Amino acid sequence: MNDASEFGLALRMARNELEAIINTSKFPADKPAGVKLQESLRGLEDINICASCFCEDGDLLSQWRGYAGG
C-alpha cells in the first residue's frame, strides 16, 4: 500500500488469473464461478479505500517522519 497503483495492480492480476481459469480449466464449475468473481470485481477501482494504522506508542516520531509527509 505504498501508492494507489498497488490496488490497481492487484485488480489486474486478479482479473488476468480469473480469465485464465475461465479459459483453461477442465472443471465445469470453474467457468461460471470465475465469471461471477469477474463480475464482482467491476467498479472496485472507483471506490475510495482508506487505511488506518495504530501504534501502542502514542507519539512514535519515526512513524510521523515516515508517513506524514512534509
Image: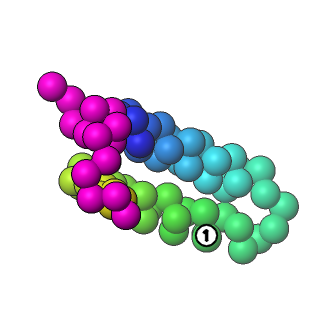
**Within the magenta stretch, is there residue 25?**
no
Vertical placement of residue 32 versus 16, above or below = below
Q: Which amino acid does the dot numbered 1 rest on?
A: Pro
Q: Which residue appears at 15% of the width and 25% of the height?
A: 70
Drawn side of residue 37 relative to residue 17, left or right: left
Q: Between residues 52 and 26, which one lies in front from this camera angle?
A: 52
- Residue 49 in sight: no
**Magenta residues?**
56-70
Name the residue tied to disc 1.
32
Drawn side of residue 34 relative to residue 49, left or right: right
Q: Position of residue 57 (x, y in %)?
A: 34, 58
Q: Where is the N terminus found, in terms of image quarters? A: top left
Q: Circle 1: is it few (<14), some (14-19), or many (20+) Cα within 10 Å?
A: few
Q: Which residue appears at 72% of the width and 74% of the height?
A: 29
**Within the magenta stretch, is there residue 61?**
yes
The residue furthest bottom is 29
The residue furthest top is 70
Check the image and tell me how it is coloured: rainbow
Q: Which residue appears at 28% of the width and 40% of the height?
A: 61
Drawn side of residue 21 relative to residue 46, left or right: right
Drawn side of residue 43 relative to residue 12, left or right: left
Q: Between residues 41 and 56, which one lies in front from this camera angle?
A: 56
Q: Position of residue 48 (x, y in %)?
A: 21, 53
- Residue 44 in sight: yes
Q: Position of residue 56 (x, y in %)?
A: 37, 63
Q: Position of residue 53 (x, y in %)?
A: 34, 57
Label 1, secondary structure: give it. Answer: helix
